[in-house]
Every structure is written in structure tokens, then in C-alpha cells.
Image (cartoon, rainbow, N blue to C red):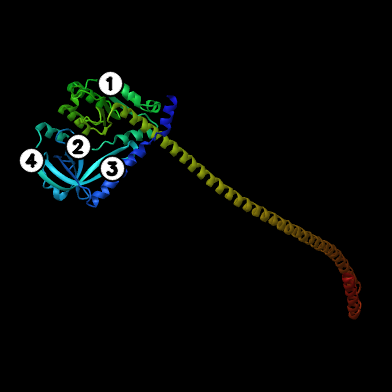
Amino acid sequence: MANSNVQQTTLARYYAPSEILNIYKGKLNADYYASRQGQLRIYMQGVFVLGKGQVYQGYYFDWLKDTSSNSYLNIKVPISLRTQLKANSLINVAGILEYNVQNAYSSIQLILEVTWAETVQVNAVSQEDIKRNELLLQKNRSTSKNVDTVLESILYEDKKPVIGVIIAETAITETDFNRGLNAAAREKIQFDRQRCSFARPTELMNVLRQMDAKGFHAIALVRGGGDEKDWGALDNLDVLQTIVQMKTPVISAVGHPDEKAFIKNLVDKVLEVPFALGSYFSNMVNEVIEQRAKSKAALVDEVKKQYEQELTQARKQNETLTEQMKALTKAQEDGQKLHDAQLTKANEKNTELQKSIDRINASITSLTSKNADYAQQVAKYSTQIEDMEKQLSNRPNWFIVILFSAISAAVAIWFFS
């Protein structure tokens, strides 16, 4: 038996979630292109419910409600056709089926592009349905709360989002929710759990209002499927009105996929079962951790690359500065050599000048000495001349002239010798 099980496991074809999603995506692609070529046209009947009332690229985005359940399909209605339709009327439509794929959580949103429409019955719904439709319109016109974006942004900052969880009073509900949570989600997200009866509208409204006032990042309604009377409060108009007026994003994980509680049309996020809600948080945490790791690795690579660039630039600058320093050092050495040569030459010239000055000073000293001797001789000869003049005063003049000339010549010869 064990071998048989191994063989079956070996032959089994295992698909990744993205592969299954792409299989359906491929089928929808084929249907869409076939419809564009006129080979496929969808005919539908339902109650016309107004959307936000805004025109986008020539279309209004409204709703087509199932007449026998709370199922809704998003429809694109051209301006020319929409003026012919009245809210809450039973209508027949034909059109092309489009889709919007959300890969992260393997969901496909279907949209019917209406190409033909006719009214079957005006005011084909009850007052209670009209009130529900008004709530849906009120919700569509309110500011959109993207739960994925809110929670992911907090997780990316490495902070803990705080989720208020309203759990039905059945043990199996919380067990299913816990089975979907992995260890990472339990660590990275803070869950504030509160049990409540989904069969008593007043109790559920009070819990919703109390949690909305606490400032949670999101509030989740968690209950498995079963008897409608056990979760009938979720279709209560007062409860629905409370949800539409809440400031906190609301997540629904109520019932089974085939159970169409109207509340699913008014919340900000729908998970079909409690286990899917736990898986939703687990998948989100895993994805954020992976993306943060990739971002961190990319940041490390970027910092490393920047560091290497700065290091290379610093090395180039260092090489340039080294070359400049070498050039400055050489210029300084050359300048010093030139300065030393000029200083040596100046010293030599100074020495020569000093010698010349010494010679001049010696000549001046010698001349001064000779001049002093000359002055003494002149004084001496002047005295002798005066004496001779006195002695020769009585002698003839010619003798005096000859004698004076001889003395003057003798003095001149002595001075210039």
C-alpha cells in the first residue's frame, strides 16, 4: 500500500497558485478576444444598482444585482445607455466580459462592458433592497480604504499592525483562523480578539463601534458557514449602516464561498472563509519579508557600489595629490638650489666688495697720514720761509725769488714722490 501511495504522489501534477491563476487568465483572454470579434456575447438579467456616479473614459461603473441573492457584478455602462436606465430597475443587458487579475492573492474581478440594455421592470426591488442599494451607493461614494496598502506600508516600516478580530462564538471558527496563521504572521501582527454573537444585531453593532473607536489598523469579522439564522445580524440594515460609517477598514471572513451575505459588498476586503483570512495575513507578511530582504540586499549592493566608486575616486585623488606633491617637492628643491647658488654668488661679491672697501679705506688712511705729514712739512717750510724772508729782507729781490722758487720746487718734489 505504501508503494502505491508513493507512485500516485510521483505521478501527480502539482500546480503553483500563479499557474492556476494563469490557466483561468488564459481562458478569459481567449473569451475576451473572441467577444471582441463578435464570437462571444454575454446576455444577463439583474437589478440595476448605481455606482459612484463618476465618468471614466466614457463609462459609468455600476452594478448588476442578482434577483435571487446578494451577488453583484460590476458593469461598465456607456453614457448613452446609462441615461435610459433607472436605479433599482430590472434590466436585460448584453456585453463583453472583461477581467482584472490580482496576482498577489489569486483573485479575478469580472466586469461586464455593456453594449446593449433594456428595462424590464421599473422599481423591481423591495424597500429593504433599495435601502441596501443605498448603502452600497454610499459606500462606493466614500473614500476607498485599501487594506492591503495600509497593512503592507506598516509592515514595510518593520512595525506591527494591530488588527481587531471579531470572532463568532463557535470554537471551530477561531481554530480555522489560527490554522491559516504562520509563525511570521503571529510575530509581525498584533491581533486583538473579541468573541461576539453574529445572531444578535445590537451586540454586533456595539462591538463594531467600540473597536472602531480604538484606532485599529483594520477590523476583521470571522465566522464559518452554516445556518443563516446564526449570522443573520450581518444582513441587518442597522449593522450594515454601522459598517458603512466606520472609519476603520473592515475585512470579512464570513460564511462559505457560496453564501452571499450582503455585507461582503460593503466591507473593504473579502476573504471567503476564516482559514483564508489567516492565510491572507501569512502571505502578506511573507511577501513583505521577502521584499524587505530584496530591498536590503539591493541597498547593500548600492552602498557597496557607491563605496567602491568613492574609494576609486579617492585613490585617483590621492594619486593626483601625490604627483602634485612630487612636483612641488622638486620645484622646492630646484628653488633651494637656485637660492643657494645665488646666495653663494652674493657672498662672493660681498667678499670682493669688502676687500675693495678695505683697500679704499687703507688708501684713505694712507692719504690721510700723508696729508698730515704734508701739513706738518708745509707748516715747517712756511716757518722756514718766514725766517728766510726775514733774513733776506735786506738782500736783492732777485735772490729772494730764486730762493723761493727753489724751496717750492723742493716741496713739490717731496709731496709727489
Q: Quadrant of residue 385?
A: bottom right
Image depth: mark 1 or mark 3 in front: 3
Q: CA distance from mark 4 to mark 1?
A: 44 Å
Query: In this picture, is 258 found above or below 321?
Result: above
Residue 124 picture location, percent across and down: 9, 37
Which residue occupies 49% across, 39% down? 300
Residue 5, located in which quarter of the rendered image?
Answer: top left
Residue with the mark numbered 4: 122
In the image shown, does 181 or 144 lie closer to the viewer?
Answer: 181
Q: Residues within 10 Å of mark 1 (few under 14, many from 20)?
A: few
Q: Please state the horizontal and vertical placement of residue 20, each as a whole percent of the image.
A: 34, 38
Q: Secondary structure at mark 4?
A: loop
Q: Amino acid at mark 1?
A: Gln
Q: Position of residue 326 (x, y in %)?
A: 65, 52
- Helix, strand or loop for disc 1: strand
Q: Earlier in the sequence, mark 4 or mark 1?
A: 4
Residue located 17% across and 46% down the image: 94
Which residue is labeled 2 in the image?
72
Residue 69 as seen in the image, left or right of residue 301: left
Between disc 3 and disc 4, whose residue precedes? 3
Q: Amino acid at mark 3?
A: Asn
The residue pinned by badge 3 equals: 100
**Residue at image mark 1:** 194
Q: Is residue 94 above or below residue 394?
A: above
- Quadrant for the N terminus in the image: top left
